[in-house]
Amino acid sequence: MAIPIMKAAMISHSHSQFQSQPLIHSISAIDETAKRRKRVVFSSSHSSELNPVIRSEVSFSVGTYLIPHPKKVDRGGEDAFFVSNYNGGVISVADGVSGWAEEDVDPSLFPRELMANAYNFVGDEEQVNNDPQILMRKAHAATFSTGSATVIIAMLEKNGNLKIANVGDCGLRVIRNGRQIFSTSPQEHYFDCPFQLSSERVGQTYLDAAVSNVELMEGDTIVMGSDGLFDNVFDHEIVQTIAGYKDVSEAAKALANLASSHAMDSNFDSPYSLEARSKGFEAPLWKKILGMKLTGGKLDDITVIVGQVVSS
Ligand SMILES: [Mn+2]
């Protein structure tokens, strides 16, 4: 049965009841795994002497931070992610589509199972190791929970080639020498209804993924996140924030905290509210239909992964 699923579109109200609540780092099996592996420095025994252009091999040093939606703190939110140190590093975020709660389905189950499956396939199955789209296909096929999720997977090869497969509105930015040099683009059916992998036939598949390749260099920084980051923090703020931190874990935490404070600020003109206005949502219609203000951040789960390219 086709179930129209929309993501929750919550603009914070002027007197947020959430502001006094502590923001607790999500605890889940996947998150624990990711935390244990967040320092990814790969040493290699492979020689590059066959390559006439001598480049040192590279890998990601990774920091992660997740802040659940203020109303979903007790269950850890509906984002999931993993970090693997396979090859130069494999990182991924999945964002459970919250509309499933209206069908009495826990929206966190699908993305968590999807990420656990993807993590388990990495390194074990030869054919997935060079193609994030194939990894996405396998992980999706192995996921039996009901639900749906947006998902992004990025794989770094030791020669610096970053392969990205993206379904929906998670995203990735590449920053080099203080400037953003690459960004993924979100895919959506209509405002606030992103492409999504689903347990239902109506959803998208790996074939719908936007696929990108970026040649990374030592010193580059990538920022991957769920829409909770990109709906609340502008790209120039990401670049600015990253510049202030050497430690990737500190950088990820700072970005997540910035997204969280913007999400709860009803006066902040966020990327999300700009997008809403550009799609024709105007007060008072906006207020009337959604009971929300036109400005403000978007309350959501916020996942941030910061990866710095280091020589290994
Ligand atoms: Mn989200």
Image (spheres, rainbow, N blue to C red):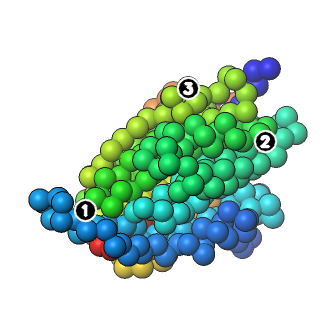
184 vs 85, nearest the viewer: 85
Please give the count of numbered marks on the rendered protein. Answer: 3
Q: How far apart are marks 2 and 1 (CA)?
A: 38 Å
Residue 156 in the figure: left or right of residue 304: left
Tell me: 51 left or right of 92.
Answer: left
Is residue 264 among what the camera can see? Answer: yes
Q: Position of residue 239 (x, y in %)?
A: 34, 62
Amino acid found under the numbered disc labelled 3: His
Q: Provide the residue designation for mark 1.
A: 217
Q: Can residue 14 be seen in this view?
A: no
Residue at 57% over, 54% down: 124
Looking at marks 3 and 1 on the same chain, the residue that comes earlier in the sequence is marked by 3
Q: Is mark 2 on a helix, strand or loop?
A: loop
Q: What residue type is labelled 2?
A: Ser
**Where, quadrant-wise, is the N terminus in this rendering?**
top right
Label 3 sits on residue: 189
- 4 relative to 23, above or below: above
Q: Name the residue under label 2.
A: 145
Dot 1: element: loop
State whether residue 205 is above or below residue 310: above
Q: Name the residue at 44% across, 43% down.
A: 131
Along the viewing direction, whichever of 56 and 200 lies nearer the viewer: 56
Cα distance between the residues tagged 3 and 1: 34 Å
Q: How crowded is mark 3: few (under 14 residues within 10 Å), some or many (20 or more)?
A: few
Number of other residues with Cα within 10 Å of mark 2, as a class: few under 14, some 14 to 19, many 20 or more: some
How many residues crowd around disc 1 within 10 Å: few (fewer than 14), some, or many (20 or more)?
many
Picture coordinates of residue 153, whole percent (x, y) = 50, 49
Q: Quadrant of the C terminus?
A: bottom left
Q: Do the residues labelled 3 and 2 touch (CB within 8 Å)?
A: no
Which one is in front in this view, the residue at disc 3 or the one at disc 2?
2
Q: Please, what is the three-letter code of the amino acid marked with disc 1?
A: Met
